[in-house]
Image (spheres, rainbow, N blue to C red):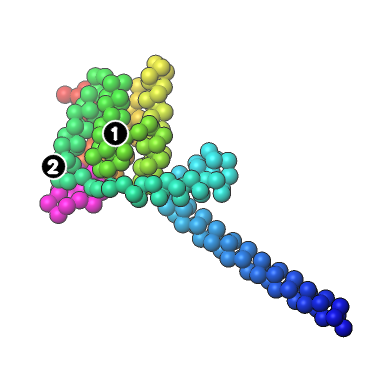
Amino acid sequence: MNTSQITTNDIVIAVVAIVVLVVLALIVAAFNRRRTKKLRAQFGPEYDRTVVVAGGRSKAEARLAERSERVHKFNIRALNSSERDRYIEEWGRVQAHFVDAPAGAVAEADQLLGDVMATCGYPVGDFEQRAADISVDHPVVTQNYRAAHEIALHQASGRATTEELRRAMIHYRTLFDELVAMPRAADAKPVAEVTIEDPSDINSRRRAS
């Protein structure tokens, strides 16, 4: 009688334990799906890149979640009207410089982007850290930033062509456009009023004159 009762209790406990484990597994799976969906939506192409770099989805998602938590602790802000106007003017000078000194202009553009990010509240660090930080709020244009930096590295060793340098300027400009277009104070000029040209347009206009 006792043996039968103990066996029945053991079976009940085992079944309950299995049910609990299944429910927990379903909860964890649902949580992971939601987390993946959220991170994919937030980081876009940066998500896929991080999966490759990290060597797996779980490691990549842990890195991206940590990255997002890190950046959310910063006091990221939009440029105010005067800062925005000043940086747009500086970009114009850098872009005009491209006509006579493409390599120097690319280096200046890289430095200018660093200055803009610092003003917005992103910490100054090495390139990979800056790119990781900026990807939290600007994941799509981060790919442009990485591409431009890669060309800048080629230029440092004398391997970049003028066409590659032109592409680097366009990549830098994409991130610059997005940073200066962040929501601003009410007294700032509308984004539509800002026009930043392709470096090749300046060259064409100069030849025509």
Are the residues at dot 1 and dot 2 in contact (C-beta closer than 8 Å)?
no
Please state, as top left, top right, bottom left or bottom right, where the C terminus lies in the image: top left
Q: Is residue 158 magenta?
A: no
Please state, as top left, top right, bottom left or bottom right, where the N terminus lies in the image: bottom right
Q: What secondary structure is the stretch in magenta mostly built from?
A: loop
Give left or right: position of 107 versus 136.
Answer: left
- Which residue is rendered at x = 38% and y = 32% of the image? 127
Q: What's the magenta region?
A: 180-194
Tell me: residue 6, above or below residue 50: below
- Which residue is rendered at x = 22% and y = 33% of the image? 91
- Which residue is rendered at x = 63% and y = 69% of the image? 23
The answer to whether any part of residue 144 appears in the image is no
Give left or right: position of 55 versus 17.
Answer: left
Type of amino acid at the residue the image marks with label 2: Ser
Instruction: In the displayed orientation, state which residue is furthest to the front.
Output: 2
Give coordinates of residue 164: x percent, y percent. 38, 26
Q: Which residue is mark 2?
A: 82
Type of amino acid at the residue the image marks with label 1: Gly
Which dot marks residue 114?
Answer: 1
